[in-house]
Image: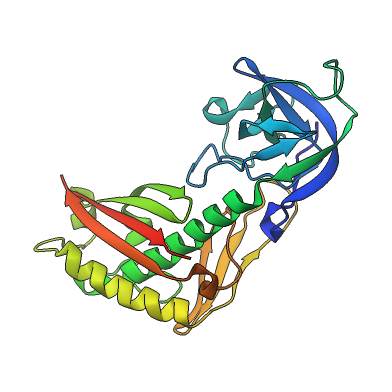
């Protein structure tokens, strides 16, 4: 099998392709095609959930990342033993189903239709774009809390998001991001003393309201068709061109989001940001 060509970065939600291989995924079947519109769960940073939909009319119950070694052995998800994009390995989108298309025999070579649940994709895309906007707005709101020089985001603010984040989960029309406010962050120069989550959230929400109202264009830079291509999210905000490395899916303009708001909470040296999109 060769690395899967993916079309989801351009917004595609349907396609037709040949099955090139099957791999077991637990007690289910993993179908690999030449070209797919499905976005799989990333095994290294599992923020955006897998697309839903059908392949050859069969429900896709999961969609995961696979990697085939030079010897032909295929690993999926957390079992992949090498770094993303390692040379000599083929990187695959594995569509997990409970059955096999056709008569149930070997489906390799069969041309099949692939259909992504477009409404679910749109909800995740909105959640993912809002997540990036909220991160940039949070960076701006916390900028004065840095006492040392720090790495900066594309808008010139100290990049709290990338420095402190421990987990990110995209949801339909929202996201949950968790940041660690521990000793390591203090050593880097960030002060969380007397941090007022409600006050910071108010600043973030004010900026988000302006960014949504600006109806700023959003695009994904796609340097190549492979699953492991290093794609970048871009948004032309009033303050300047924002960019964040990202392998997910997105809206095309901030105005599509309707309303984006965040809530912040502090618990055991962790700051949690819950972002909600109201289209």
Q: Residue at x 58, y 65 (%)?
A: 251
Looking at the picture, does residue 219 appear above or below residue 49?
below
Q: Position of residue 79 (x, y in %)?
A: 55, 25
Name the one closer to the observer, 180 or 86.
Answer: 180
User: Which of these two is toward me, 19 or 163?
Assistant: 19
- Position of 135 with respect to 66 (left or right) is left
Is 223 situated left or right of 218 in this image? right
Query: Which image quadrant is residue 9 in?
Result: bottom right
Q: Residue 256, image x and y in percent?
A: 54, 70
Q: Quadrant of residue 204?
A: bottom left
- Which residue occupies the foreground of this view, 10 or 225? 10
**Residue in view at x 52 percent, y 29 percent:** 78
- Left or right: 131 in relation to 185: right
- The answer to whether residue 56 is seen in the rendering is yes
Question: How is the protein colored in the picture?
Answer: rainbow
Residue 28: x, y in percent?
65, 19
Q: Is residue 130 above or below residue 208?
A: above
Q: Is residue 194 above or below residue 115?
A: below
Front-most of residues 77 and 202: 202
User: Which quadrant holds the N terminus?
Assistant: top right
**Across the whole image, how many numbered discs are drawn on residues?**
0
Residue 43: where, in percent of width, then height?
A: 54, 36
Q: Residue at x 43, y 60 (%)?
A: 131
The answer to whether residue 148 is seen in the rendering is: no
């Amino acid at each position: 099998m060769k690395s899967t060509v993916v079309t989801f970065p351009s917004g595609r939600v349907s396609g037709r392709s040949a099955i090139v291989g099957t791999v077991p995924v637990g007690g289910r079947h993993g179908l690999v095609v030449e070209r797919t519109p499905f976005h799989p769960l990333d095994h290294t940073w599992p923020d955006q959930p897998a697309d839903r939909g059908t392949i050859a009319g069969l429900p896709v119950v999961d969609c995961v990342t696979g990697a085939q070694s030079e010897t032909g052995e295929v690993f999926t998800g957390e079992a992949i033993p090498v770094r993303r994009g390692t040379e000599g390995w083929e990187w695959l989108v594995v569509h997990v189903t409970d059955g096999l298309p056709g008569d149930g025999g070997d489906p390799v070579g069969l041309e099949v239709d692939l259909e992504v649940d477009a409404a679910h994709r749109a909800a995740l895309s909105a959640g993912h774009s809002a997540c990036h906007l909220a991160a940039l707005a949070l960076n701006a709101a916390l900028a004065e809390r840095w006492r040392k020089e720090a790495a900066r985001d594309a808008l010139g603010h100290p990049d709290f998001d990338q420095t402190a984040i421990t987990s990110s989960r995209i949801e339909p029309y929202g996201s949950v991001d968790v940041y660690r406010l521990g000793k390591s962050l203090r050593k880097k120069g960030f002060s969380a003393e007397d941090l007022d989550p409600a006050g910071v959230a108010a600043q973030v929400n004010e900026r988000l309201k302006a960014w949504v109202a600006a109806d700023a264009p959003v695009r994904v830079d796609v340097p190549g068709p492979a699953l492991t291509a290093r794609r970048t999210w871009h948004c032309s905000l009033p303050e300047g061109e924002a960019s964040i490395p990202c392998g997910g899916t997105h809206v095309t303009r901030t105005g599509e989001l309707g309303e984006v708001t965040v809530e912040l909470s502090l618990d055991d040296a962790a700051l949690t940001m819950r972002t909600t999109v109201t289209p």
